[in-house]
Amino acid sequence: MVNNQKVSAVIVTYNRLNLLKSAIESVLKQKSKTLKHLIIINGASTDGTGEYLDSIDDKRIIIEHLPKNIGGAGGFNRGIRLFFEQTQDDFVWVMDDDALPEENALSELMEMFKNNVQAGWGASKVIWTDGNWSKMNVPAALQDGSSGILNNNTEWVKLRNATFVSTIFKREVVQAIGLPQKEYFVWGDDIEYTDRAARVAEGIFVRSSIVVHASQTNASPGAIFNENNQNRLPRYLYEYRNRILTSRRRKSAVRLTKTLAHTGIDFVKTLFWPKVKYRNEKLKIIIKGTMNGAKFNPKIEYLRK
């Protein structure tokens, strides 16, 4: 029975102490009795996160302080490994340090597994702080992609992929597909990983499982032409590189063509859109990231029982 099973939550954090405190509180106050562990991966934060985490006295919490920041992808890779190697829990529930699950978020996910015995993973509905959809976290339905989620009121919808803001996996799925690709560093590791999960097990979107994504803005994913923070631009190298590898692994010429077309649209918008800041730098990033994606192919790490 799902009610007798155990869940480890994983939070990856880097220099967002105030948000992390809220995320920890939101996870630990879940109504579901299935939550047994909270694994927190601290990516070498310098804002007092380490000291705060070391001050927590809660036997459910497992903390790892990394010697350097290895990005969200590296953090989730490490967190899921700790779930697998240091607990006997049946599910791993992953999220960022700015994800605030409502009190029944986990209960609704577990209810889905209870009623869908073929499901191997699931994802919550992610909203922004104003109650609207979090644009960067809308999952893709197996049929009709994101529109199959947005234009549908069905409680449970079969998934193609989802982001790492409240996504949950059965232990046997992790065993089958290995760990998230730490080499992605940031952006796209969640889509690649849930793509892998969807190839071996049914994934289900759970509309009644609600999580608030307290990101600074409700931005669309990968919208480089709208980016106004020059310090964030290097991240887009990973975005364009990683999306190519993810598409290549789908082994579909049609999907790869769509990915390249998406990148082409970004390039054209960046080139011609009025008032684009750092235009030349952005164009170079799109080209370089896409070229890097053609040869990027790190190995997947698999776990032993």
Image (spheres, helix red, strand yellow):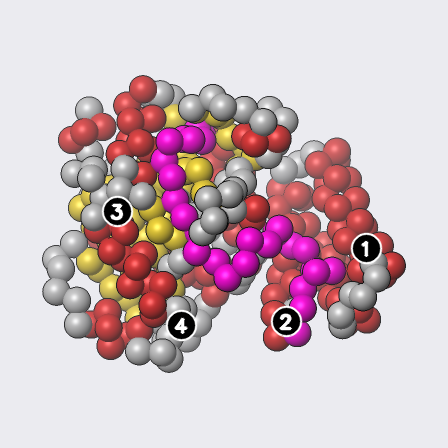
The residues bearing labels 2 and 4 have C-alpha atoms spaced at a distance of: 18 Å
Q: Which residue is mark 3?
A: 8
Which residue was labeled with disc 2? Answer: 229
User: In the image, is 20 to the left or to the right of 183?
Assistant: left
- Alpha carbon separation for disc pair 1 and 4: 32 Å
Q: Which badge, 3 or 1, is on the more N-terminal residue?
A: 3
Q: Which residue is rendered at x = 16% and y = 54% of the image?
A: 60
Label 2 crowd bin: few (<14), some (14–19), many (20+), radius 10 Å: few
Q: Position of residue 168 (x, y in %)?
A: 36, 40
Identify the amino acid type marked 1. Lys
**Between residues 246 and 3, which one lies in front from this camera angle?**
3
Dot 2 or dot 1: first in sequence order is 2
In the picture of the structure, the residue carrying the numbered disc 4 is 15
Q: Amino acid at mark 2?
A: Asn
Tell me residue 148's x, y (percent).
Answer: 58, 27
Instruction: Name the residue: 44% across, 72% down.
Output: 69
Q: Which residues are magenta?
A: 203-230
Say which element carries label 3.
strand
For marks 2 and 4, give the one nearer the viewer: 2
Q: Can residue 107 be seen at all in this image of the molecule?
A: yes
- Labels 4, 3: front one: 4
Kind of residue at disc 4: Asn
Q: Position of residue 216 (x, y in %)?
A: 50, 62
* Residue hosting label 1: 269
Badge 4 or badge 3: first in the primary sequence:
3
